[in-house]
Image (cartoon, rainbow, N blue to C red):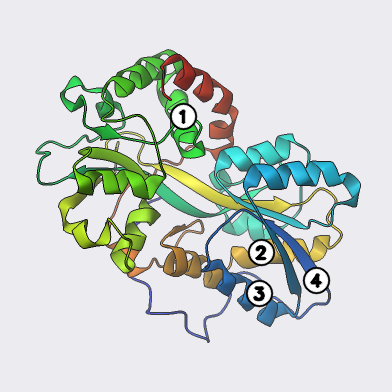
Amino acid sequence: MPSFRSTLSCSGLAAALLLASSPLALAEGELNLYSSRHYDTDERLYSDFEELTGIKINRIEGKADELIARMEAEGANSPADILLTVDTSRLERAKAAGVLQSIDSEVLETRVPAYLQDDENQWFGFSQRARILFYDKETVDQPPLTYQDLADPKYKGMICIRSSSNVYTQTITAALIDHLGEEAVKDWATAVVGNFARDPQGGDTDQLRGIVSGECQISMSNTYYFGRALRKQVDGVTESKDKIGWVFPNQDTFGAHMNLSGGGVAAHAPNKDNAILFLEYLASDQAQQYFSAGNDEYPAVPGVGISPSVATLGFFKPDDLDASAIADNISAAQKVLNEAGWK
């Protein structure tokens, strides 16, 4: 069972930090990257790769579904070498659309845990975020300790959460279906809807702001949104961070649900070797540490230090459910949410 401990990384990334994967020798050419990761901090990942390898990265950025549709439309003429995106469901959607290809990489198969890889090596996870529960410490004496607890009638009118169309909502529901069964999760979702403080709206940061404003007392969010508010100013959260408590759910059972950020090599990649090299770089200690230091995420590769903002959240047991199993339950999850009246 994997675990995340509160071990602090060194401040900053030392220039002498060596890649833990096989050395990235200087190469030639370029890499066409399609990315739906919308973080300015990723610039450092790209510039470091270019400096290490001599390979020039050309980027096209957009929403995941738009990029997948674009790759489908481009077909064999697509210039894409890599698709980089967030969430298991989108990675699986890309695979189902036929825009990724299976690859052979001993580095990736060794470095990335098997449960964070596609079973046909079409995509690999490179960073994680725990989807956990937050609560108002001033008004909630007994916070929910499990995802199932959100259905408890004592939390009626207290919960802020994202919509059923959001991939984070879909993947946590898909994971629960694997653990508890579809009928049990349908009952759970229906009860949670009955405990809403408001109709689902906004992003994860908005759920945290709902606690600060008093609109709700309990919410669900990915850890990196709160970690970011601990590290720098996030309006509506940072100034009231001491008001917010958090719980890593289901620590006595299957553990806290983990959302995945990952990527794969495009089906018609014109620069396939460079694409594989880039994915191997993302699995290196240097890049893995920067996912945490730059964007408050958890590394996918075991043993890599985490940043102070992430370490502040503490030690916990993550759910090591196979990412492919989650992806297989997405359709069932959407059906359950619809039937529960989860807007």
- Secondary structure at numbered mark 1: loop
| Disc on the earlier residue, 3 or 2 | 3
Determine whether 62 is above or below 257 in the image: below
| Disc on the earlier residue, 1 or 4 | 4
**Image marks 2 and 4: residues in contact by CB distance under 8 Å:** no
Residue 44 image point, x, y percent: 56, 74
| Disc on the earlier residue, 1 or 3 | 3
Residue beneath label 4, please? 30
Question: Closer to us: mark 1 or mark 4?
Answer: 1
Residue beneath label 2, please? 280
Judge from the rendering whether residue 246 lies leftward or rightward of residue 122; answer left or right: left
Residue that appears at 83% across and 74% down: 29
In front: 158, or 131? 158
| Disc on the earlier residue, 2 or 1 | 1
Three-letter residue code for mark 3:
Phe
Does residue 101 appear in this view? no
Residue 264 image point, x, y percent: 69, 51
Q: Which quadrant of the figure contains the N terminus?
A: top left
Residue beneath label 3, please? 49
Q: Residues within 10 Å of mark 2 (few under 14, many from 20)?
A: many
Spatial CA span between label 1 and label 4: 39 Å
Q: Which quadrant of the figure contains the C terminus?
A: top left
Residue that appears at 67% across and 61% down: 279
Spatial CA span between label 3 and label 2: 10 Å
- Secondary structure at numbered mark 2: helix
Determine whether 161 is above or below 11 in the image: above
